[in-house]
Amino acid sequence: MKTVNTLIIVTAMTTLVTGPDPPLASVIAARPNVLFIAVDDLSTALGCYGDVLARTPHIDALAASGVRFARAYNQLPLCNPTRASIMTGLRPDQIKVYDLDRHFRDEVPDVVTLPQTFQKAGYFAARVGKIYHYNVPASIGTDGFDDPPSWNQTINPKGRDKDDEPLIFNAEPRRKISAALSWLAADGEDTEQTDGMIATEAIRLMEQHQHEPFFLGVGFFRPHTPYVAPKKYFDMYPVQEMRLPFAPAGDRDDIPVAAFAHNCPVPHYNLPGPVLLQAMQAYYACVSFVDAQVGRLLASLKRLNLADSTIVVFWSDHGYHLGEHNGIWQKRTLFEEGARAPLIIRVPGRGGNGQACRRVVEFVDIYPTLTSVAGVDAPNNLAGRDLTPLLDAPLSEWDGLAVTQVLRPADHRLKTMVMGCSIRTHRWRYTEWAEGEEGIELYDHRTDPGEFNNLAVTPDAAAKRVMARLRPMLHARASGTVPATPVNQKRL
């Protein structure tokens, strides 16, 4: 384990208190800590989100003590763009990040990230594991695609999962294990795996900095492929209990070609059913493995008497498919499964704790919300909204909507690159591909939560009115044109 980019910053804090420094306890109370937990490629496959298979007692307990946002949506369902958007509080079209290679500072070099804002307020900011983008598993143990100004300290554990890579089963040998359905029921203990080591290092940092305000980003790599977890977690999910998700016959007939991601153009990768069920088992095993590490973090907060002075944020970078729509796997879609992701926020003392919020919110809302509840000054150009009213009263009136977009490369299906943009309201999802030239989708979530019936194919008068109302709202937040800034089509 190696600690890099270590910098201790001493700042002169100015407060409303004059004369001698106030007691340390009052300073901590005025400046709550932030435990910022990110999970890679985690869908809503969690017990607290209604998944009947998932065994996730620790994340469920966090949801029971905080506010679980049932309808939270990312801005672009791909690791680098969504993480850059969350950490800058800006939309993809503002930072011009659409692929896995472009860094947000190429477009906005002076942007102040979320942890930088907390540093300015006198916080110690540290990262353990994956907060910004990493190539998984290749970059495990390195800084990945990090942003050095964001942190005072970074730690990059590397566990036995890296050494065990030759043992990983790859269901699609023509693909790298990073992109294929691939997995390993590993020998050894949790703490030998990279994610177990991440939890251990994060706990050590909490112990070291418990007497000063901290912003601690803790990023777990699983359940990103390859799906690697200790064997005991696989045993929790017998393959015979796995089932592929339902979709009606002909479900794909009314869906535009561009809606299907280029990394999964063929249903189920043409893999046989038993292999797909094993992949599903492996995914759920990794979810439970990460849940156990989250439990260790939460237990340490309690042990260190920090639970009442620490804001906890739990999020995944985007959603994830496990075979929906007759064979979609992984990410990069604008369907509900790709655009929606878990978001739980626990702020000590807030009235909404222990409740679910079913209002539509966006991941760009995380930045202004955290600065608001922590009493930290935020940049004035953030794209999102402060969710504090929903933390106090999750059933409050809220005219929320969410916009998610994704860029498709030119390939055998599409002659040129195509931008897809989707808007989600409480009832509707409306999606355009190349501003409608490559297809339009409209789904009514009141009657069709699985998004099986595309009302835009033969719209009636009511559907036309809905699309006419949603179209300008979508265009105000995302452009359907192909960006002029550099894009690596092989890394979309």
Image (spheres, rainbow, N blue to C red):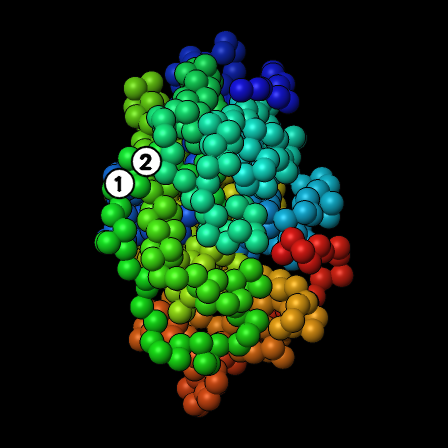
Q: To which residue does mark 2 refer?
A: 231
- Residue found at x 58% / y 23%: 153
303 over 442 or under it: above or below: above
Position of the C terminus, as image quadrant, is bottom right
- Residue found at x 58% / y 63%: 262
User: What crowding class fits label 2: few (fewer than 14 Cα within 10 Å), some (14-19), or many (20 or more)?
Assistant: some
The disc label shown at residue 235, or none: 1
At which x and y percent is residue 51? 27, 53
Give residue 2's quadrant in the image: top right
Residue 366 vs residue 484, the one in the foreground: 484
- Residue found at x 67% / y 41%: 111
Image side of residue 307 versus residue 35, left or right: left
Amino acid tagged 1: Asp
179 over 211 or under it: above or below: below
Q: CA distance from mark 2 to mark 1?
A: 6 Å
At which x and y percent is residue 28? 42, 21
Query: Can residue 54 be seen here?
Result: yes
At which x and y percent is residue 36? 45, 35
245 over 35 or under it: above or below: below
Is mark 2 in CB contact (under 8 Å) with mark 1?
Answer: yes
Amino acid tagged 2: Lys
Query: Can residue 309 be seen here?
Result: no
- Residue found at x 51% / y 25%: 157
Element marked by disc 2: helix
